[in-house]
Image: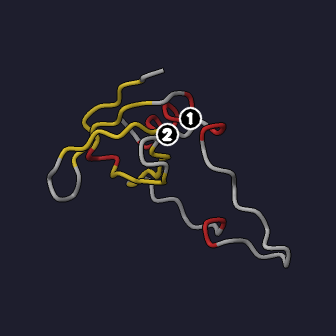
Amino acid sequence: MTYDEIKSVLKEKVCIVDFTKMNGENRLMKCTLIEDQLPPAPVSDGDGTFTPAATTTAVNEQVLAVWDLQNNGWRSFRVDRVNSIIPVE
């Protein structure tokens, strides 16, 4: 699957993503990109600046950041190391 295909599925569903970590270990991660399941977006600090998470950077389509529902945090994986994606909802 491509970066855009994986991102599209995760924006609509909670999934178990099976991927191989850089050290060779397999990992199963229950994750999503459904907006109402993500933490609140960063807000302005009041002086026109934003927290570092709000800064804009170029998109790296080799790595996808997702919300890990079991660890309640942002995690990422390399798209070319995804073995399978199984929707759970």
Q: Which residue is drawn at 42% across and 48% down?
A: 71
Find residue 82 and report its image quarter: top left
Query: Which quarter of the image is occupied by the N terminus?
Result: top left
Q: How far apart are marks 1 and 2 (CA)?
A: 6 Å
Q: Would you call the spot at circle 2 few (<14 residues within 10 Å), some (14-19), or many (20 or more)? A: some
Q: What residue type is labelled 1?
A: Lys
* Direction bottom: furthest residue: 47
* Direction front: furthest residue: 71
Q: Which amino acid does label 2 sit on?
A: Lys
Q: Position of residue 18 (x, y in %)?
A: 28, 37
Q: Residue at x 55, y 40 (%)?
A: 33
Q: Where is residue 67 in the image (x, y as percent from the top left)?
A: 50, 46
Specify the label residue 44 is tagged with.
none
Find residue 70 and report its image quarter: top left
In this rendering, the answer to whether 8 lies above or below 72 is above
* Direction left: furthest residue: 24
Question: Label 1 belongs to which residue?
Answer: 11
Q: Where is residue 55 in the image (x, y as percent from the top left)?
A: 64, 69
Nearest the viewer among 57 and 85 is: 85
Question: Label 2 belongs to which residue?
Answer: 7
Do the residues bearing badges 1 and 2 touch, measured as CB atoms within 8 Å?
yes
In this rendering, the answer to whether 53 lies above or below 6 is below
Secondary structure of the residue carrying numbered label 1: helix
